[in-house]
């Protein structure tokens, strides 16, 4: 292969690495700044999330890398559940199951420029919208689900093929969380 044919690959790889290291800014994943004027509001929704926090790029680190399961529970309404895949690009999970990183990876705070982490950064928009629709909430650009607190977390044991020296911090992350929303000031979560 001539040198000229390899040159275009270098900028493309550099762009991918920047997205992975910086958290990216892609559709269906990533941490773009919130639209102007959104504030973080709380709700009566909790969730149990189980996710394999290992990467799939350039190869699957574990057999279930970037796969997850979530159950959301809305007080006085009910629950909904789904399986999901974390987008290939935009939400880096290269550091494995490390409870000291859970808040930095998943939790939004009232400082949006620093801690704007909508759930669609790690879950496909369509899957997330269908999940919340089942409990009476229409997720949108003006009502963006996010994790506001982690109540409990643990690294569950990995399978025999998903541990060893080539797997950074083996284990599956399980967490119980509180869900809030990025929304315009004064927004009230609709009752079902």
Image (cartoon, rainbow, N blue to C red):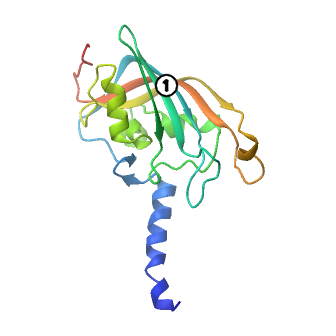
Measuring 54% from the left and 34% from the top, which residue is drawn there? 103
Measuring 38% from the left and 25% from the top, which residue is drawn there? 180
Measuring 40% from the left and 36% from the top, which residue is drawn there? 119
Between 125 and 12, the one nearer to me in the picture: 125
Q: Is residue 168 left or right of residue 85?
A: right
**Residue 140: image x %, image y %?**
25, 34
Measuring 64% from the left and 52% from the top, which residue is drawn there? 61
**Residue 172: image x %, image y %?**
64, 36
The image shows residue 11, relative to residue 90, as above or below, that is below
Between 150 and 138, the one nearer to me in the picture: 138
Task: Residue at the far bottom: name it.
Answer: 2
Circle 1 SS class: strand
Badge 1 density bin: few <14, some 14–19, many ≥20, Cα 10 Å = some
Q: Is residue 50 left or right of residue 5?
A: right
Quarter of the rendering containing residue 191? top left
Q: Provide the residue designation for mark 1.
A: 149
């Amino acid at each position: 292969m001539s040198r000229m044919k390899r040159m275009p690959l270098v900028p493309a790889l550099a762009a991918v690495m920047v997205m992975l290291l910086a958290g990216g800014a892609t559709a269906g994943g990533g941490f773009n700044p919130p639209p102007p004027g959104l504030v973080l509001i709380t709700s009566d929704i909790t969730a149990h999330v189980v996710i394999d926090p290992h990467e799939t790029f350039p190869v699957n680190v574990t057999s279930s890398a970037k796969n997850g399961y979530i159950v959301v529970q809305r007080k006085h309404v009910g629950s909904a559940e789904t399986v999901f895949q974390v987008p290939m690009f935009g939400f880096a999970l290269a550091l494995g199951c490390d409870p000291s990183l859970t808040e930095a990876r998943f939790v939004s705070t009232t400082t949006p420029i620093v801690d704007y982490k909508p759930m669609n950064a790690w879950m496909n928009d369509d899957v997330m919208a269908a999940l919340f629709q089942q409990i009476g909430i229409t997720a949108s650009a003006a009502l963006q689900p996010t994790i506001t607190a982690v109540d409990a977390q643990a690294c569950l044991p990995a399978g025999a093929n998903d541990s060893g020296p080539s797997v950074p911090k083996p284990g599956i992350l399980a967490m119980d969380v509180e869900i809030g929303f990025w929304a315009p000031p004064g927004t009230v979560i609709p009752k079902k």
